[in-house]
Image (spheres, coloured by chain):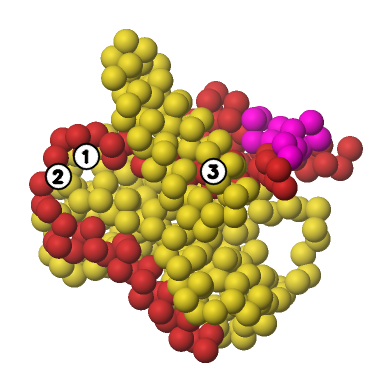
Amino acid sequence: MIWVNIILCGIITFLIRFIPLSGIMPRELPLKIKNTFKYIPLAVLTPIIFNGLSIFENNQYFIFENFKLYSALIAVFVALITNNIFATISLGMLSFLIMNNV
Amino acid sequence: MQNWKIFKQGVIEELPLQIGVFPFGVIYGIMAIESGLTPIQAFLMSSIIFGGASQIAFVQLVSNGIPTGAILTTVSAINSRHFLYGISMLDYLKNLPLRWRFILSYLLTDEAYAISIRKFINEPKELFLHFHLLGTGLTLFISWQISTLTGVLLGGNLPEFLELQLIIPLTFIAILIPMINSLSTVCVVITSGFSALYLKNLQLDYWIIISGIIGIIVGVITSKLDKKDDLG
């Protein structure tokens, strides 16, 4: 049964990615729709960031001793200054390990 | 050979992200084994589904005995954002032969999209943009297979203090910060982020998609303010 689930999920995932590029969709999209595209990566990936920082769980905010949140803020700062992906991830992770183990 | 030069550029630009992807793949591999999947199932799922977050959700649901319908719905919901990626790349890829679009669809994941869409937007007249996505996508694919295999072989033997799951938000921060260059993009981040926290707390299966749609709507509405307040 696990194999069936894996294969069905694989087919569905591929179709989700393929249908927009398959030619079924209109080849020229209205300008208003095109203008929304620039917001898509921000709008769908930001929730993954917020969720990964455990800010709000079980109806409670978790801010003051949330080292993940502080590390993320440091990563935001590094990203703004350096615009370097490697530096952002490395310094964010390093700051978390230091805070969590001091 | 301009096409291979662009392919190589895609590979090189994708490589730094592997510092985030690799631990993610290792985590998935470990979780899959701990959830009762065989090593072959755990490893091959990474090429059959090829979607990190949805694979981790899959093994969690399987280990809890959740029925097929719920697993399919959850995986579809998590990966439905890739539909939006495809739409946003349609303009650049629509004239390619079907075999190219078939291959690129398979490779169209978060990290490949995030890197290649910047190239697509910045150089829309470039003829070989598809080679860039091929480069980012293949790099990610190979990294994902190797990291999954590493996780499968490691089993549950990693120290807990490493908190490898933190690398996922850090990776997306590194990708998204350069895209925040106007008042409307700031509004998108705030609304999609906080609505995600709220909606997930309500235990809605589609919290990622709903909060994403809220963010996009707010972005469109506030885009009228950008001409006056552009931060870029």
- Name the kind of residue labelled 2 in the image: Leu
Q: Which residue matches tag 2? A: A29
Residue at point 31% right, 62% down?
A: A17
Give the amino acid at mark 1. Ile
Pointer 3: what residue? B196
Marks 1/3: CA–CA distance: 23 Å
State the image coordinates of residue B58 (x, y, percent, origin top left): 55, 71
Rendered view: A73 above or below B47: above
Let me know if marks 2 and 1 both belong to one chain: yes
Residue B194 visible within the image: yes
- Residue A91, given in percent of the width and then of the height, sits at 66, 36
Tell me the crowding category of disc 2: few under 14, some 14 to 19, or many 20 or more residues within 10 angstroms, Cα based: few
Chain given the colour red: A
Provide the residue designation for mark 1.
Answer: A33
Asked if the magenta segment contains residue B133, the reply would be: no
Crowd tier of the residue under label 3, counting other residues whose Cα lies within 10 Å: few below 14, some 14–19, many 20 or above: many
Q: Residue at x 66, y 77 (%)?
A: B63
Chain drawn in yellow: B
**Which structural element holds mark 1?**
helix
The magenta segment is: A60-74
Viewer-nearest residue: B210 or B154: B210
Q: Residue B79's x, y, as percent?
A: 42, 60
The residue nearer to you, when weighing A11 against B191, is B191
Residue found at the far right of this picture? A102
CB within 8 Å, label 1 to label 3: no
**Closer to us: mark 2 or mark 3?**
3
Name the secondary structure under disc 3: helix
The picture quadrant where one finds residue B220 is top left
Q: Is residue B81 above or below residue A93?
A: below
At numbered mark 2, what does the secondary structure look like: helix, strand or loop? loop
